[in-house]
Image (cartoon, grey):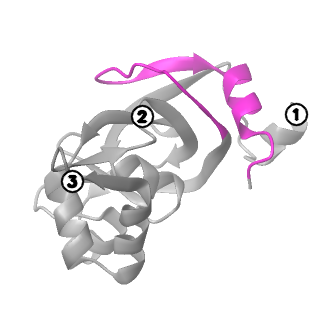
Amino acid sequence: MSEQLGLFGDGLPEQVRCLSFWSPYGQLIVDRIKTIETRKHNRLAVGWCVVHVAKKIDHEAVDRLLHGSSVRVANAVEGYLTYDKSWRRWQCADAGKLIGLVWIGESGQLRAEDEQAACIYEPGLVAYPLSKARRFAHPIEGVKGHQGPWYISREHIVSALEGSS
């Protein structure tokens, strides 16, 4: 276990904070494409955070990212979601799973030049730099998310990380 924790330098607390992210944002975070999280408030604490992909898909963001972003972002989004023609909607294989870990830094104001890193720009949003993101080798399935932070034990995270790069 200490070998896995050594990958993070700062170590992990006994109980690790989790946050639910709508798809495709959660996947973009753990794949180090979205390196700034945005919120309307500055209440996110600095530290490690487990990324949970909520069952909700931000369809407006999917459309914007597929047609108005870089090829890299658009290709990533297409890889996370499948379009069900009979239901006429996107579906996400990662929904309801804990898929990775990320470090959340100190907040600041989102700047227009941060749009690519945040995958969005809206004046007045608070920006949280994200770093040290790592996708789990073994996602933790069947997890019901919550609004706001919630917690999971470090042992679950370490076993999910085994074999990740």
* 50 with respect to 76 (left or right): right
Residue furthest left as drawn: 123
Residue 24: give its label.
none
Range of residues picked out in magenta: 138-164
What crowding class fits label 2: few (fewer than 14 Cα within 10 Å), some (14-19), or many (20 or more)?
some
Q: Quadrant of residue 131?
A: bottom right
11 relative to 143, above or below: below
Query: For numbered disc 2, what is the local secondary structure?
Result: loop
Residue type, numbered disc 2? Ala
Q: Name the residue carrying label 2.
A: 45
Residue type, numbered disc 3? Lys
What crowding class fits label 1: few (fewer than 14 Cα within 10 Å), some (14-19), or many (20 or more)?
few
Q: Position of residue 48 (x, y in %)?
A: 56, 37
Q: Earlier in the sequence, mark 2 or mark 3?
A: 2
Q: Name the residue carrying label 3.
A: 85
Q: Is residue 42 visible?
A: no
